Image (tube, helix red, strand yellow):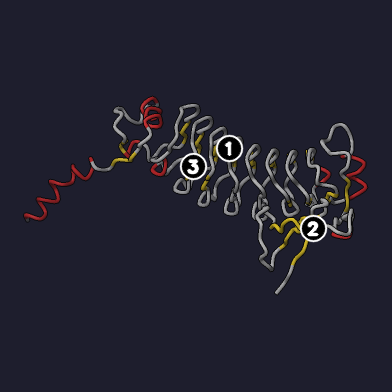
Amino acid sequence: MKKLLFILLCLPLLTLAQQTYVPDDNFEQKLINLGYDNVLDDSVTTASIDTVTSLLLMGGSIADLTGIEDFTALTELDCNNNQLTSLDVSNNASLIDLKCSSNQLTSLDISNNTALGYLNCEENQLIILDISNNTNLVRLFCHYNQLTGIDLSNNTALIYLRCDNNKIISLDVSGVSSLYGLACSNNQLISLDLRNGNNINMNPACADNPNLYCIDVDNETWATDNWNNIGHHIDTHHYFSNNCSITGIEEHTTNKELLKVTDILGRETKEINQLLFYIYDDGTVEKRITIE
């Protein structure tokens, strides 16, 4: 009986203890302005936020979104134009729409956001963007970052991709048959595979890639006739082929020196059993797969 009475007395205290830690005063002030909190004390009642579906935090000078993990019903998050250096929304499993552009992000964890359909993370400092689990992604804006590569092999629902103004070395959209919009200009591309069976509906922009020569396409003649004009952003030295192979790379010198070996994401490696790019000092590139 005494134990039961003790538990009953503690219940109000347990209810009061259900608080979410929010250390960033600018974040908490936004929550106060939105009516989810009333005192600037580094915490907010969890019950007041765990049913929120849309959260708009634009331009609030927020540097830390600790506490976002308890917005478990969130489907839309807009935290554009803040001062975030990292963002982890892996606990927001219902998220469909994420806007986090114009921050200082070097880390973005969306590994558990399988429902995500729209992602805008432009104008950050991202070196790696892992979207392998985001199989429902339809629109991706990741331009103006520091990406050296992006793996789209699991993103077959993608219809629009803007990844221009990065440092991407190789881009393969051949498995994304729904893609119609592609902007990959101003990168460091040496390989671009557009053979997705949907070229007639695509409008690619891939200019300002000085080390890119041959572009893989569905139909060489059609691409030459339709994409080599003022309306398309194609460099004058670009040409099209149904199969840009290592035999199509011009040898500029017989004494070329190997500079580095990278994987499809542009990371230096010498691992086997995967596609590798051998980059030489004369601008030539060899694609190799060593199977063991």
Element class at badge 2: loop
From mark 1 to mark 2, how far is it between C-alphas? 34 Å
Q: Residue at the location (69% across, 68% down)?
A: 273
The label shown at residue 86 is 3
Q: Quadrant of the N terminus?
A: bottom left
Residue occupying the point 83% across, 54% down: 284
* Label 3 crowd bin: few (<14), some (14–19), many (20+), radius 10 Å: some
Determine the residue positioned at 38% across, 25% down.
Answer: 33
Instruction: Give percent across and percent down for residue 179.
Output: 73, 45
**Disc 2 residue type (three-letter):** Glu
Q: How crowded is mark 2: few (under 14 residues within 10 Å), some or many (20 or more)?
A: few
Task: Specify the farthest residue to the front.
Answer: 255
Q: Which of 194 and 81 is in front in this view?
A: 81
Numbered mark located on residue 257 in the image = 2
**Mark 2 and mark 3: Cα distance apart in space:** 39 Å
According to the picture, the residue beneath numbered tag 1 turns out to be 124
Residue 23 location, quadrant: top left
